[in-house]
Amino acid sequence: MKRIVLALSLLATVFCSAAAQDPEVIKAYLKSLGSSTVSFTMSGTGLDGSTISSQKGVVQVQYPCFKIESGGQEIFSDGSATWIHNLATQEVVITGPMLESMIPDASLNLNNSGKPILKFSNKNGTSMTFTLDKVAPCEPWPADHFVLDTKALCDEVVVTDMR
């Protein structure tokens, strides 16, 4: 219950703030989720403002770690590295931390239904908008839950480490 009250308080603060938000407010909201499973709807917006993609997914979050399953991809992040696993093409790309670099250009608001909306804007004019449809707190995961063990994947999977 405390988590829900804290999350609602943070959302109220953010909702009343200016559009250009302090990254610490976004981090505080993500931290307030604790260990949670979140169902979301994501839409991507192109340079002309049109929706270029839309999909549903699930993220298991334990800031700064997360695991996303959506659109035929799994994305794991332990806060230090990010593994993007494309199930259809049998490819994994490993990069540095993803979330921290996106937070400075993020905003948090509520939609008309009162659901939190996280929007990540890119400097090129595109954006990704995540509507958090359902947040369910859960027990904490061990740290290795947010790491993709590439050695356990089949031999056909191509792994590219870009760190």
Image: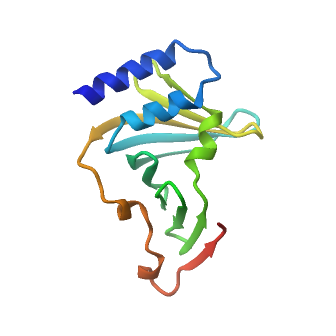
* Left or right position of 142 against 160: left
Which is more toward the observer, 49 or 139? Answer: 139
Residue at x-position 47% and y-position 76%: 150
The residue shown at (33%, 36%) is 134
Residue at position x 45%, y 18% in the image: 112
Asked whether 51 or 1 is in front, the reply is: 1
Please state the horizontal and vertical placement of residue 6, each as a whole percent of the image.
33, 24
Residue 92 at what x, y percent from top left? Answer: 56, 71
103 over 112 or under it: above or below: below
Q: In which quarter of the image is the C terminus?
A: bottom right
* Image location (x, y in percent) of residue 12: 43, 16
Above or below residue 60? Residue 22 is above
Relative to 55, residue 80 above or below: below
Question: Coloring scheme of the render?
Answer: rainbow
| Residue at the spot 27% in from the left edge and 40% down from the top edge | 137
Q: Please identify the residue farthest to the bottom as the structure is shown.
A: 155
Quarter of the figure with the N terminus: top left
Residue 68 in the figure: left or right of residue 137: right
Q: Position of residue 13 (x, y in %)?
A: 47, 16
Give the number of marks: 0
